[in-house]
Image (cartoon, rainbow, N blue to C red):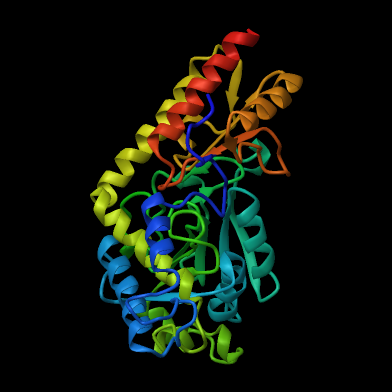
Amino acid sequence: MKQTTKRAYNFNAGPSALPLEVLQKAQEELVDYNNTGMSIMEMSHRSKDYETVHNEALSRLKTLYAIPDNYEVLFLQGGASLQFTMVPMNFLSEGKKASYVMTGSWSEKAFKEAKLFGQAVEAASTKENKYRNIPTLNEIQFDENDAYVHITSNNTIYGTQWKEFPETGEVPLIADMSSDILSKEVDVSKFGIIYAGAQKNLGPSGVTVVIIRKDLLEKANTTIPTILKYTTHADNNSLYNTPPTFGIYMLGEVLKWVEAQGGLKAIEKNNDEKAKVIYDVIDQSNGFYKGHATLESRSLMNITFRVTDEELEKQFLAEAKEAGFIGLNGHRSVGGCRASAYNAVPFETCQALADFMVEFQNKHS
């Protein structure tokens, strides 16, 4: 099962696989970008060459995601973890409460930060079910006076994903989409804010994308540090301070790659096929493999499962690593196995894992 090339079967949860074509282009341009005699990493973020890269990346993301004109797109730093803080700092005002839907570790972390700045409550939770599923829409409880409702669209650790988003009316819906952004078409107009770290589907680590409705910017708290205000970055085209220039360059190249694949419809179809080939092995294994997530909540991005015999599971992971499969260990907090099949993971890589799983089961059944 070993690959004949030097490329690994990369199932890392993040930082994760990048398109080979993008890496190769970056390699070609690394030392001399656009005949400037400089790497993109060496040039001023105020230069025309970099500003072109910056603005084209913004424009491509707006087009691919069909982002309405009444939204700003920001390139920030600090990952989703900083957004856990920035969201309540900017929008959880006195006399309001924020409602958080608890679906895993990252929603727990976001909720913990919100409680530092005001009243935050659980709108729904599937913790008692070991986060095996996403709450049904009628289980989500919030008030029309809430500051916002917060969800995590895809849960990397538990392998669950929202298939339908709640309708929150006048209450802004805020989503951490770090691990499934740009994996399928999304109606951005349903959300007040979408934020995502780049290192799953958008590019290398270091860039955080924030898509924010302009009317929310007008309501944001003004008595917080300048660098933590969304308005600061919106007013300066995300160039208030030095941005992660190379990461944004790479993000732009990934967006070009998405376009070349046929856009989000094609990406979603490919993601469906990739996940199915692995889930089918799990479902047809007669209990040898057991998925963590319930059927209706299964993630296309993070396929979580166990080998039902604990000792065999250790052997499975060891042999998989030897065969060139990287990143299959489940998160340290839950154990088990996890295959993260983000956009840039080829179908052939997922098929290779499925074949390996079948072979392993046949040897040990």
The vertical placement of 104 against 319, above or below, is below
* 285 to the left or right of 365: left
Q: Position of residue 10 (x, y in %)?
A: 53, 42
Which residue is at the front of the view, 144 or 221? 221
* 316 to the left or right of 174: right
Q: Position of residue 93 (x, y in %)?
A: 57, 80
The vertical placement of 137 against 146, above or below, is above
Which residue shows up at 54% across the image and 63% down it?
A: 205
Which residue shows up at 41% across the image and 65% down it?
A: 251
The vertical placement of 293 against 193, above or below, is above
For the C terminus, the image quarter is top right
* 48 to the left or right of 123: left
Which residue is at the front of the view, 199 or 194? 199
Q: Give the quadrant of residue 70.
A: bottom left
Whether residue 96 is visible: no
Whether residue 280 is visible: yes
Exactly how many numbered labels are in the figure? 0
The vertical placement of 311 against 161, above or below, is above
Which residue is at the front of the view, 100 or 14? 14
Q: Position of residue 214 (x, y in %)?
A: 36, 80
Q: Position of residue 332 (x, y in %)?
A: 73, 43
